[in-house]
Image (cartoon, rainbow, N blue to C red):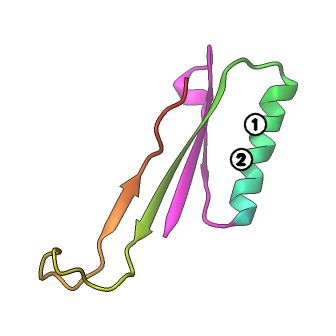
Amino acid sequence: MSGKAVISSRRIHIANNFSIEVDDESGWKKVEKGVECWMLQNKKDINVKLTILYKNLGGTNAESSDDDSPSSKKVQPPQCC
């Protein structure tokens, strides 16, 4: 359904982090440009946290509840060191 990327770096205030909507390829290009910009400014430890909100469109499972509406889930990949 949608995605959001947050670009952060060590020694940068949280208020100065970039938050970019990633709904299509152009959104991801913005993320790449933001990382490239910070790399050119010699920022250290640049992190990109990608959060994806998706809708499960698969068939109903026998183990699932009787609710017929598709569920929305938020997934965050594990943080790397």
Q: Where 43 falls versus 7 (above or below)?
A: above
Decide whether residue 23 is among the magenta residues: yes
Q: Position of residue 45 (x, y in %)?
A: 67, 20
55 falls in the magenta region: no
Residue 44 occupies which quadrant of the picture?
top right
Q: Which residues are magenta?
A: 1-24
Q: Nearer the viewer, residue 14 or 44?
A: 44
Task: Locate residue 50 relative to residue 76 in the image: left or right.
Answer: right
Residue 49 as seen in the image, left or right of residue 36: left
In the picture, the disc for residue 31 is 2
In the displayed structure image, the side of residue 7 where residue 29 appears, left or right? right
Real-space Cα distance between discs 1 and 2? 6 Å
Which residue is located at x 54 percent, y 29 percent? 80
Q: Which residue is mark 1?
A: 35
| Residue 22 x %, y % | 62, 58
Q: Is residue 4 above or below residue 68?
A: above
Q: Are marks 1 and 2 in contact (CB under 8 Å)?
A: yes
| Residue 68, quarter of picture | bottom left
